[in-house]
Amino acid sequence: MFQIEFNEAGSVVVAGRLDAAQAPRAQEFLDEVKDECVVDMARLEYVSSAGLGVLLRTHKRLMGDGRGLRLINVSNHIKDIFMYSGFDKLFQIEVADQSGPD
């Protein structure tokens, strides 16, 4: 299951699996974003190369206007996917606080 929506703060929240089956829906949603965009990935379980492509196309479009994507609450697993693909050099990525209760 995949969800994409705006939260109260105006950030884009993604949840579930951003794969080839969900990429068109995600692209359609992100095509409506016109300003600097924060994407909250706290509930994202998986991103495929198709999902990375959606994020890259959106980032490039926004960068053309002097804006871009900022990815927040990125899990270590998702961060690794960005790192292995080299996309960690393209996006501003903030890793989620994964420390548990003391």
Image (spheres, helix red, strand yellow):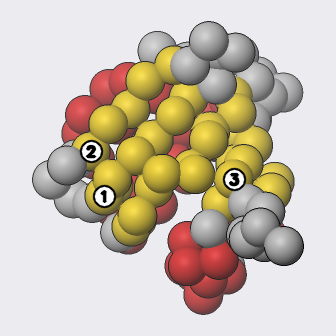
Residue 88 seen in this snapshot: no
Q: Is residue 22 above or below residue 48?
A: above
User: Residue 38 is drawn in which quadrant?
Assistant: top right
Q: Which residue is mark 3?
A: 73
Query: Which structural element holds mark 2?
Result: strand
Q: Give neighbour class at mark 3: few <14, some 14-19, many 20+ (Cα, 10 Å).
A: some
Residue at x 52% of width, y 34% of height: 13
The Cα–Cα distance between marks 1 and 2, rounded to whole angstroms, is 5 Å
Q: Give neighbour class at mark 2: few <14, some 14-19, many 20+ (Cα, 10 Å).
A: some
Residue at x 73% of width, y 60% of height: 96
- In the rendered structure, which amino acid carries the disc numbered 3? Asn
Residue 41 seen in this snapshot: yes
- Foreground of the two, 40 or 60: 40
Q: Which residue is mark 2?
A: 2
The reply, left or right, for residue 46 in relation to residue 13 is left
Direction left: furthest residue: 21
Q: Which residue is mark 1?
A: 17
- In the rendered structure, which amino acid carries the disc numbered 1? Arg
Query: Which structural element holds mark 1?
Result: strand
Closer to the chain start, of discs 3 and 1, is 1
The Cα–Cα distance between marks 3 and 1, rounded to whole angstroms, is 15 Å
